[in-house]
Amino acid sequence: MTLRIVYVSTLKPDVDETRVAEMVAKAAAFNQSRGITGMLALEGQRVCQILEGPDDAVNALYASIRHDPRHSGVAELVNASINSPTFEAWGMVRRPMIDMVTKALTIQM
């Protein structure tokens, strides 16, 4: 079964652009090795992310994010089984928040 989790959070003030770039690069490799794909959007310190992949892998990753001290106010917006991933060809990519909103309006939640 394939799972989609969408969440929002706020990065701590000390997480600057350099740290974000490092996090994204590390996460992309980690996620790819576990069959997780998705989209990450940032606007200032606000984060919105869509995670898709095998149930166990996505649930474990989301649990890790919820306990990551770099994030605060983690709130789950969607947790749903899906027939096929939307971001299969993308892996994990970073996009502007407006792209996230546009994509979210076009995928079946």
Image: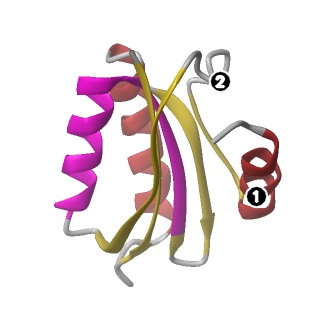
- Residue 45 horizontal/vertical position (percent): 51, 77
Instruction: Please check the rendered image and state whether residue 91 is part of the magenta-colored stretch, yes or no.
Output: no
Residue nearest the observer in this picture, 105 or 39: 105
2 or 1: tag closer to the N-terminus: 2
Mark 2 to mark 1 CA distance (whole Å):
17 Å
> The N terminus is located in which quarter?
top left
Instruction: Please check the rendered image and state whether residue 65 is part of the magenta-colored stretch, yes or no.
Output: yes
Residue nearest the observer in this picture, 79 or 41: 79
Label 2 crowding class (10 Å Cα cut-off): few <14, some 14-19, many 20+?
few
Give the magenta part as a residue range.
47-68
For residue 74, side relative to residue 51 (left or right) = left
Return the mark for residue 90.
2
- Residue 7 horizontal/vertical position (percent): 46, 58
Secondary element type, mark 2: loop
Q: Nearer the viewer, mark 2 or mark 1?
A: 1
Residue ID at (66%, 25%): 86
Residue nearest the observer in this picture, 13 or 49: 49
Residue ID at (40%, 73%): 11
- Residue 105 horizontal/vertical position (percent): 79, 50
Amino acid under label 2? Answer: Trp
Amino acid under label 1? Answer: Val
Residue ID at (38%, 84%): 13
- Residue 100 horizontal/vertical position (percent): 72, 53
Return the mark for residue 101.
1
Q: In this view, does 22 lie above or below 52?
A: below
Q: Is residue 17 above or below residue 54?
A: below
Q: On the image, which quarter does residue 91 sit in?
A: top right
> The C terminus is located in which quarter?
top right
Residue ID at (34%, 79%): 12
Secondary element type, mark 1: helix
Residue nearest the observer in this picture, 92 or 57: 57
